[in-house]
Image (tube, grey):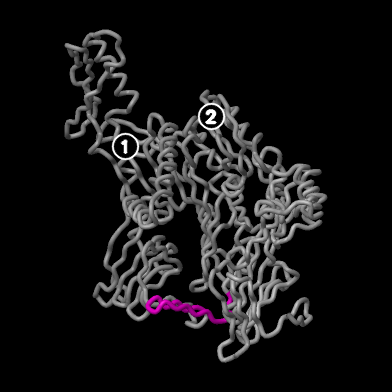
Amino acid sequence: MIPRLIPDTFDLQRLYDADGKALYDSQDRALYVPNPAPEIPAHNGLGELGEAQSCLAKNQINAPPELTMVYPITGSLYADLKERCVIMAQPERNRDPQPYRIYRITKPMRGLITVYARHWAYDGLSGIPVAPFTANDIQGAMAGLKANAMVSCPFTLTTTRTTAAKFSVPVPTDIWSLLGGQQGSLLDVYGGEYSFDGSTVRLENHIGQDNGVKVRYGVNMTDLEQDTNVANCYTGVVAYWQGEDEEVHSPVLYTGGSFGYVRILPVDMSDRFESKPTVDQLTAAGQSYITANQIGVPKVSWKVEMLELADTEEYKNVAILECVNTGDTVGVEYGALGVDASARVCADEWDVINERYKSLTLGSVKSNIAGTIAGQARELKQTVTRAEAKSLAEQISDTLTRAILGADGGTIRFLDTNNDGEEDTLYVADNPDPAQAVKVWRWNYEGWAASENGYNGPFVLGATVGGGLLANFVTAANLTAGTIQSQDGETFLLNLDNGTMQIGGNGIITSSDGSFVINLSTGVLYTTAEVTYDASNYSQSDVMRIAQIIAGSVTPTSSDYEKYDFYQDGEITGADLTMCQNMVNTGTDLTIAWSAKVQPNERGKTFSLEMNGNTVFRAGVNQIETHDGKFANKVGASVVEATTQIVVQESGNTNMILLNASTGRIDCNSLYINGQQVTP
């Protein structure tokens, strides 16, 4: 199926019927519906992405489905590919197309971009907060998520499980985190496995099914990547009971099969018997333990590269796996050991365009898979919590450690790239065949480079002797540098050696929200802010107090100015009275927005301060002006307190102003009041 592109303005919920199934017309076209729309027209959205070089849908148990697409910049829909657009694509065999929201698009390299998208449910549910509530079972908890959503929730949340346990949401939390991203989530409390289908998210006991597909170890898996944990496989158990002064144990109980070694597991059965058991009772308990815990069955993990085997003789041995999906159970026969095991498809990669699997990952089925996944959810939350408290250096170290230690398989080779008989390139990748590799590191005498898009890139990280370290993005806890500059060397230059910063272009520094601006070219500083007054802090007595201040019957204190001077302009006026009365009458909080601008004039001889667009203060070398007494004394204290004289005088000028705080005397050449000269 060719993936289709849906614009970001589209009401995605209208793609689905009441049961969450995608709607298509007789020509298998998505029913794209603009919002609002009086009817549902048949439409292909913005069009089919048939020019995509590759499109892989990645599925894993209890993880958000992902989609990765490589698309050429010459493609007809290149200009329409934007973040938050939706790609409708088939996630697996025999599955309805699913919506994937684009969250990242790389910059073009060698004419190609890589588009990353996640299932619509992840994007939608991550932004829907849930108000605090409690539930006593999983049915009530799942229903409560939607019932207590603080904004509209277009998703259907359901479950087939019936587990009873208390679930609590103590503070507003987004739905996605409550599904399984933190301690105390649904997965943590109830266990289970999620399925995502359109606008429906379902928590089930077990996704997938057992269709009777079987593979033989060493036959179907010939020449495939396989990890068999035989070293930790026990060949038998010995059960024992221990009291205060006595002990009883069973004989060694073997599991059967030919292992070539002996590894016996002692099992404490003391908590299973209230009194001392017999040897026969311990033997029976030990046999039951072997069966319940699959003792003697190796834990296996295979990653089957289906596309790599498609044209080989071995493909006939694994072709049956084309019939499975994530969560399905596959039988595993160990002929040499004489035992059988079960493995599950725990992850897969589906080639959307060619409608076949690129790879399948099979893993052992544990006795309590729900408990295991719930434990993983707890570990995830603990990891996140610890990361928040750690320094960036520690977080970087943890990220690198998880990536390196979490790598499964891979290859290291030396390649002869020009066929001259000399190995010239160090090749490190996730696949021995460069044509099939996705994650690749290459080294030669020119430098090194890394790619997540195959052997020939495009590369996103590397280094050369001439160009230094080159990367799309860099995260660093500690950076030592002499200068940091923009690409052109002029727009921005930070010299850390002499502590200077130069900004070219418009020379403007702006905060992220635009509330603070400095223009380095003009010297203008501009800032805005808001202050909100809580209506519950005001009553009719405050209204009367303001009225008395305006009438002059009481002298305002500093506390009065802090509480009643809403514009913070040094005056308590009728406007303040009106705003206070409105808060008392309506109970509505009052928000005051203000702005300030400091601007130099006449080449630095003076500067002015504007409040809300009005000039309220101007200062020069030998003059200070205020506007309408805005900066007048609030409570009668001296503007300047001093016991010595203060002289204001321009350098080289005989004119001056002399203030004597001790005598209260002011001496000046001339005095102007309200623009009129006054003779002392």
Q: Rate crowding at label 2 as few (under 14), some (14 to 19) or many (20 or more) other CA atoms within 10 Å.
A: many
Number of the front mark, 2 or 1 = 2
Q: Position of residue 559 (x, y in %)?
A: 66, 51
Q: Which of 114 and 53 is in front in this view?
A: 114
| Amino acid type, label 1 | Lys
Give the answer, above or below, for where 570 lies relative to 623.
Answer: above
Q: Where is residue 320 in the image (x, y as percent from the top left)?
A: 44, 43
Please give the range of residues in magenta.
492-508
Q: What element carries label 2?
A: strand
Q: Name the residue under label 2.
A: 167
Give the answer, above or below, for where 313 lies relative to 331.
Answer: below
The residue lying at 23 percent from left, 19 percent from top is: 239
Q: What element carries label 1?
A: strand
- Horizontal side of residue 413 vs 262, given as left or right: right
Can you tell which mark lies on residue 299?
1
Q: How far apart are marks 2 and 1 (CA)?
A: 33 Å
- Horizontal side of residue 99 vs 216, given as left or right: right
The residue lying at 33 percent from left, 49 percent from top is: 225
Furthest-front residue in view? 663
Give the answer, above or below, for where 133 lies relative to 241.
Answer: below
Furthest-bottom residue in view? 652
- Horizontal side of residue 341 vs 595, given as left or right: left
Q: Which of 661 and 538 is in front in this view?
A: 661
Of callouts 2 and 1, the N-terminal one: 2
Q: Does the magenta stretch include residue 482?
A: no
The residue lying at 71 percent from left, 71 percent from top is: 616
